[in-house]
Image: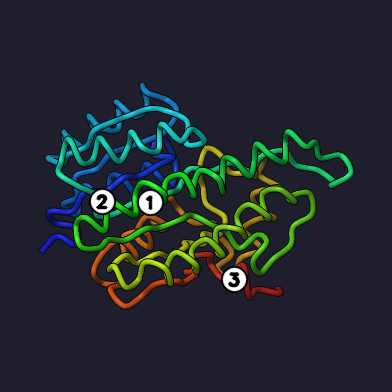
């Protein structure tokens, strides 16, 4: 039996990396998927690829920092498929990096808006739609950075992603009685186009930080998102789920 049969899902940041792999996996597991990102051409290609594999996906491009876009994604899910069961709020950015004394206020705000405010806006419209369906699964992509590890030069990124843990916990407590589960997924280093390792040397450094001595593929992180989206995690809420290859505990 398919894990997400008859479910309706939104996946943001779906044009590449973890979001793209997750959208494909959700569709393979039976979900009707709304794929969201800024780049329409990439989303259209993804939706066509899903359709070619006998899945169902609809693309809507926009900026997750815009409240109107957050509402439009939910409206599309309701109008096209009849509701919303799953939202993987995965879109994010590393943002401006460097010592805090050199970090601009605009850079700080842009990173928080992209990673944290976008999650608030998504949840604002996603949660009521899930309640209409009798419950659902809300997932945020956070990170080990700012949770178990402090990495120099990543002030705004760490703060924004750590904020998602607090958002997760409060929403889980607030909407658990309504049948909405809320969890955060914390990937380790992942081989995506947005990865911060750009040279063989930097990649080797990042790989060595992990207990598994490698980075993840997007498909590996997608499988953890599938767990949180599906009934396999029916008694899991308010959790920060590590899929980090042991980077949080490794000291070698």
Q: Position of residue 181 (x, y in %)?
A: 34, 67
Q: How far apart are the alpha carbons under marks 3 and 1?
A: 27 Å
Q: Which residue is mark 3?
A: 211
Give the mark, 3 or 2, whose residue is nearer the N terminus. Answer: 2
Q: Residue at x 86, y 39 (%)?
A: 102
Label 2 Cα crowd, 10 Å radius (few <14 / some 14-19 / many 20+): many
Give the mark, 2 or 1, whose residue is nearer the N terminus. Answer: 2
Identify the residue at the far bottom of this view.
235
Q: Position of residue 231 (x, y in %)?
A: 23, 69
Label 1 Cα crowd, 10 Å radius (few <14 / some 14-19 / many 20+): many
Q: Position of residue 141 (x, y in %)?
A: 48, 54
Q: Position of residue 199 (x, y in %)?
A: 67, 40
Q: Which residue is mark 2?
A: 26
Q: Residue at x 21, y 55 (%)?
A: 132
Q: Indicate left or right for 99 with 202 as reference.
A: right
Q: Secondary structure at mark 2?
A: helix
Where residue 88 is drawn, which disc sits there? Answer: 1
Q: How far apart are the alpha carbons under marks 2 and 1?
A: 10 Å
Q: Residue at x 57, y 71 (%)?
A: 246
């Amino acid at each position: 039996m398919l894990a997400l049969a008859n479910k309706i899902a939104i996946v943001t940041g779906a044009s590449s990396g973890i979001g793209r792999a997750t959208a494909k996996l959700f569709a393979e597991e039976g979900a009707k998927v709304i794929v969201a990102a800024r780049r329409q051409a990439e989303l259209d290609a993804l939706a066509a690829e899903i359709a070619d594999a006998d899945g169902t996906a609809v693309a809507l491009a926009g900026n997750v920092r815009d409240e109107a876009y957050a509402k439009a994604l939910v409206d599309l899910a309701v109008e096209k498929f009849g509701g919303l069961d799953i939202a993987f709020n995965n879109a994010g950015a590393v943002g401006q990096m460097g010592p805090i004394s050199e970090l601009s206020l605009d850079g700080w705000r842009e990173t928080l808006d992209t990673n944290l405010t976008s999650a608030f806006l998504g949840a604002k419209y996603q949660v009521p739609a899930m309640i209409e369906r009798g419950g659902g699964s809300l997932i945020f992509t956070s990170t080990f950075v700012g949770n178990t590890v402090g990495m120099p030069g990543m002030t705004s990124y760490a703060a924004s992603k750590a904020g998602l843990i607090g958002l997760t916990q409060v929403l889980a407590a607030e909407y658990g009685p309504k049948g909405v589960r809320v969890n955060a997924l914390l990937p380790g280093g992942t081989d995506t186009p947005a990865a911060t390792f750009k040279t063989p040397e930097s990649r080797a450094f990042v790989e060595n930080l992990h207990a598994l001595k490698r980075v993840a593929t997007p498909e590996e992180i997608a499988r953890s998102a599938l767990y949180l989206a599906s009934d396999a995690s029916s008694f899991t809420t308010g959790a920060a789920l590590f899929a980090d290859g042991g980077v949080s505990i490794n000291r070698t």
